[in-house]
Image (cartoon, rainbow, N blue to C red):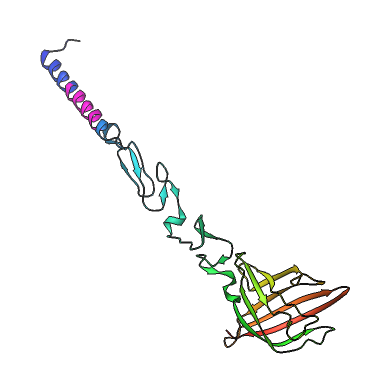
Amino acid sequence: HIFTPQIDQQMMKYTLIYLFTLALSFSFTSCNQCIGPFGKEKIVCDNGGTCNDGECDCLKGYTGETCSQVDLCELNDVVCVYGDCVEGDCICDEGYEDESCNLETRAKFIGTYRVDEEGCAGLDTFGFYDIEIERNLLNGTGITISNMFNAQQFSINGIFSDVDATVQTGSANFNIFNQSPDDNDKSLSGSGSIDFSDSTATKLSIQYEVIKGNKQYSCFINAVKVE
């Protein structure tokens, strides 16, 4: 083939334009690390993220090199007052409950209760008196019950010291583990619950066993909150 000078000049022109464009492309790419050759995206950011200086700036709730990882706690603005957020849900510290861990489990039990019916099978222990439930400062789920087995009226069989119990998280119940409050030959164990179904009165019930020597008594307390 024989090329004329005019055709050679045109080919040279197109070649120079191509090389110039290619040079501009690489020059632009070197200045912007997010853009590849010919303006194509070099780094793609997911979930609405944008690339700046070769790195993805993620929107709220998204993390990772390309914003592909979801942080449900941040995305949904989850606040755990006494606990930690895991996968969008609150894991509460011991002694706290509710969706945001802002409720103290034992708080609903604290107060003074008027016993209006009490009895231990085999003992003449019916009477009217007050019992007090307070926080056990040494235990996040613990409570103490004073005058539970009325020592003022039943000096022989009564319990003078406070009785310790543990509240069950997320429920209206507590457990009285086996113990000897007065450090003598009497021991007791049992359980209790609180009832809010009556809007006019908060009711407390306790069932427990008292062991004295070789004798065992089953006891019941029904009370209404007065303070």
Residue 194, located in which quarter of the rendered image?
Answer: bottom right
Closer to the camera, 184 or 97?
A: 184
Q: Residue at x 14, y 21 (%)?
A: 13
Q: Outermost residue, right direction?
A: 214
Residue 27 in magenta stretch: yes
Residue 227 in magenta stretch: no
- Left or right of 172, for residue 6: left
Residue 205, located in which quarter of the rendered image?
Answer: bottom right
Q: Residue at x 53, y 69 (%)?
A: 103
Q: Could you say where residue 138 lies in the image, as x and y percent from the top left? A: 61, 64
Closer to the camera, 213 or 224?
A: 213
Q: Quadrant of the C terminus?
A: bottom right
Q: Is residue 175 above or below residue 116?
A: above
Residue 180, located in which quarter of the rendered image?
Answer: bottom right
Q: Could you say where residue 44 lies in the image, as x and y percent from the top left? A: 36, 41
Q: Could you say where residue 169 lies in the image, as x and y percent from the top left? A: 62, 67
- Left or right of 95, for residue 48: left
Q: Residue at x 33, y 36 (%)?
A: 42
Q: Is residue 182 above or below residue 7?
A: below
Q: Which residues are magenta?
A: 16-28
Q: Residue at x 84, y 74 (%)?
A: 212
